[in-house]
Image (spheres, grey):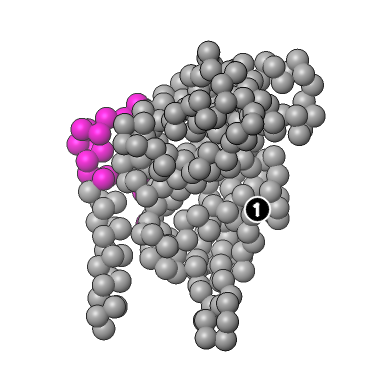
Amino acid sequence: MSEVNIRNVTKIYPGHGAKDAPVLALDDISVDIADKEFCSIVGHSGCGKTTLLNMLAGFEQPTAGNIKVHGEAVGRPTWQRAMVFQDYALFPWLTVEQNISFGLEMKQVDIEKRRTIIDEQIRLVGLVGFEKRYPHQLSGGMKQRVSIARALSVNPEVLLMDEPFAALDAQNRAVMQQEMGRLLAQTDTAVRKTMVLVTHSIEEAILLSDRIIVLSSRPGRIKEIMKVDLPRPRDEDDPRFIALRHRLRELINEEVEDEEVEAKA
């Protein structure tokens, strides 16, 4: 069963003045994302990855085409879809547990159930013992764990992630990728979410995804959709992993080479 249906989606940004031509960011994107699938979107910088994610969240609207989740058109942000941002977007005046509780309070979840959910999420992301800490007392990786826990706490149908580990140093990024892989491997399929990740990291996409959508350079079009049929947790030294990485690099490098040819023409 498909959870997310993207049909003939095009996005055009108007120019800001008489001399600025409109920008065609995405052109005729169509893809289905299955229930409980982890799908990554990769491509050259400026190909429209984040634009597509923002339209899935309801922050922006397509110029043409439509996006549906469980058959309902996406018209605005709702609890049905939660976003994890690159810069954490935590409230600095709230503790770890208060940040996680925020969405639950907005949904008017009763205090006993709220406490159970908060405890469960803190355990899930490995932050037991840090419940009373404030964001400035946490490492970047820990802040992002809070952000993920906050998003999951409201029980969304779809979890959207925009470069969630990009601001971390290499060591913390690797740890968070491993932790996300662990959650995907261990989480009961009955409670697993449909997840869509935007990333510049080829390795991250292969480590975490069931499928990878490769977008062309602007205007973004679907160049290829790759299935990642590897058991979790995944080994970067696995020959199958290396082959997928090589193919993805080829696809993205082709776009860079095409841009250079056009620039010289």
In this rendered view, identify the residue nearer to me: 177 or 156: 177
Classify residue 260 as left or right of residue 88: left
Q: Is residue 225 magenta?
A: yes
In this rendered view, identify the residue nearer to me: 45 or 41: 45
Classify residue 259 as left or right of residue 74: left
Classify residue 253 as left or right of residue 12: left
In this rendered view, identify the residue nearer to me: 16 or 22: 16
Name the spot of residue 252 as percent of width and height, x first: 30, 58
Question: Could you tell me if residue 207 is visible in this image?
Answer: no
Name the spot of residue 256 as percent of width and height, x first: 28, 65
**Residue at left offset 40%, top offset 30%:** 176
Question: Could you tell me if residue 111 is visible in this image?
Answer: yes
Q: Secondary structure at mark 1?
A: loop
In this rendered view, identify the residue nearer to me: 76 or 247: 76
**Residue at left offset 29%, top offset 51%:** 248
**Residue at left offset 70%, top offset 55%:** 75
Name the spot of residue 152 as percent of width and height, x first: 60, 31
Q: Quadrant of the C terminus?
A: bottom left
Residue 238 falls in image quadrant: top left
- Classify mark 1: residues with Cα within 10 Å, few (<14), some (14-19) or many (20+): some
Q: Is residue 111 magenta?
A: no
Residue where numbered disc 1 is placed = 58
Above or below: residue 164 compared with residue 148: below
**Residue at left offset 54%, top offset 30%:** 135
Q: Which residues are magenta?
A: 224-245
Above or below: residue 123 compared with residue 238: above
Q: Quadrant of the N terminus?
A: top right
Q: Amino acid at mark 1?
A: Gly
Residue 151 falls in image quadrant: top right
